[in-house]
């Protein structure tokens, strides 16, 4: 069985699965409408583990932009340190994100939240029959996004599509603007396949730095994690302008610095890439802005910014896949990892 065959198929299948993801969120759900109309909560806590914690970071920023007071935290933090997260006099909604719906920390955090905080629980998952889903007040499931591979690819991005829809609904944006996403994803994977392969197979690159700000920081973290999990390559993620404050000391001719260029911050963030290229690094930029002097993945300029965070990721998943194969790793089965973390002592 060829190494990475499941991972590659799951990366390339994302456009088809996103079609289902776009219909998974029902803004007319009576329970959802009742919460919103009654102003049933003051804050949203978004939680997950590993990849889904990084997705929680993006979700919280998108919800804040939509006018919700949202906070992201790892499920283990919510479980073990709830008093530093939940203020007793405030009302909370818990948004759980989990591919499998069986991760122990997330399940325990959900149970503790229901017992102590007594707020509503919404779960976004890829398994509608999971324990996490069965204990939630509202479930948004994309079962078609489940994976054979251990590293999350289409599951993460499909749940990200749903989160973008949820936040857009809160902001009263036109959800129809997101209909082109599957076709755009397909074009990105096809048109930048050679870029992902050439960079992934470039032996001169031994360090990968992923830079993102605002909602894109969580996406940068997930891209970093995919590179670590699949290929065991040195990779780190940072807030874009924070990279100057110490981490850039690691940059040299052995580095690839990848900038996820945020709408509204292109001038400042491209300047960071320019400076890293001046230190000898290769640079790859992804964004809607016109970018010169660097390799870049151009996202459609006509899409509203709220639609775009998920589009930064597929080419970077493909990059991680090619680096894994180049390093002799099997991205389907990353070293020391399992698909679900199950604990009996927490």
Image: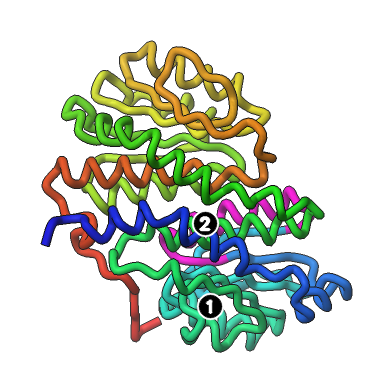
- Front residue of 138/50: it is 138
Indicate whether 339 appears above or below 164.
Answer: below
Q: Please name the predominant secondary structure of the magenta segment in the image.
A: helix
Residue 150 circle label = none
* Residue for point 88% across, 75% down: 38
Q: Is residue 61 magenta?
A: yes
Residue 109 circle label = 1
Is label 1 in a helix, a strand or a loop? Answer: helix
Q: Quadrant of residue 86?
A: bottom right
Q: Where is residue 323 in the image (x, y as percent from the top left)?
A: 22, 41
For label 2, the residue is 55
What is the magenta range? 47-69
Whether residue 224 sits left or right of residue 142 in the image: it is left
Q: Position of residue 312 (x, y in %)?
A: 49, 41
Instruction: Check disc 2: other Cα within 10 Å, few if <14, some if 14-19, many if 20+.
Output: many
- Name the quadrant of the N terminus: bottom left
Q: Earlier in the sequence, mark 1 or mark 2?
A: 2
- Name the quadrant of the C terminus: bottom left
Asked if residue 84 shows in the view, the reply is no
* Residue for point 29% across, 65% down: 150
Indicate whether 145 appears above or below 171.
Answer: below
Q: Do the residues labelled 1 and 2 touch (CB within 8 Å)?
A: no
Number of numbered discs on residues = 2
Q: Does the magenta stretch include residue 129?
A: no
Whether residue 336 sits left or right of residue 192 in the image: it is left
């Amino acid at each position: 069985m060829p190494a990475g065959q499941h991972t590659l198929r799951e990366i390339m299948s994302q456009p088809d699965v996103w079609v289902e993801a776009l219909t998974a969120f029902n803004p007319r759900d009576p329970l959802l409408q009742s919460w919103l109309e009654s102003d049933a909560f003051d804050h949203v806590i978004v939680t997950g583990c590993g990849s889904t914690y990084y997705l929680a970071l993006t979700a919280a920023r998108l919800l804040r932009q939509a006018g919700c007071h949202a906070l992201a935290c790892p499920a283990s933090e919510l479980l073990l340190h709830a008093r530093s997260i939940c203020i007793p006099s405030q009302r909370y909604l818990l948004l759980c994100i989990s591919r499998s719906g069986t991760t122990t920390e997330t399940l325990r955090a959900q149970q503790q939240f229901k017992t102590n905080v007594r707020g509503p629980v919404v779960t976004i998952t890829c398994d509608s029959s999971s324990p996490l889903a069965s204990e939630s007040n509202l479930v948004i499931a994309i079962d078609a996004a489940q994976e054979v591979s251990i590293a999350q690819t289409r599951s993460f991005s499909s749940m990200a599509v749903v989160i973008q829809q949820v936040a857009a609904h809160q902001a009263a944006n036109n959800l129809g603007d997101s209909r082109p996403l599957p076709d755009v994803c397909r074009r990105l994977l096809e048109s930048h396949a050679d870029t992902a392969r050439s960079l992934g197979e470039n032996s001169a690159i031994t360090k990968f730095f992923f830079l993102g700000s605002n909602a894109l920081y969580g996406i940068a973290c997930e891209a970093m994690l995919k590179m670590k999990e699949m290929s065991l390559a040195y990779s780190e993620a940072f807030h874009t302008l924070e990279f100057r404050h110490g981490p850039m000391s690691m940059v040299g001719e052995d580095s690839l610095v990848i900038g996820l260029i945020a709408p509204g911050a292109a001038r400042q963030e491209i300047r960071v890439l320019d400076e890293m290229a001046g230190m000898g690094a290769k640079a790859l930029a992804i964004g809607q802005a016109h970018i010169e002097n660097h390799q870049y993945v151009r996202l459609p300029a006509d899409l509203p910014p709220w639609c775009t965070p998920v589009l930064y990721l597929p080419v970077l998943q493909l990059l991680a896949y090619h680096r894994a194969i180049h390093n002799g790793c099997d991205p389907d089965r990353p070293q020391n990892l399992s698909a679900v973390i199950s604990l009996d002592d927490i």
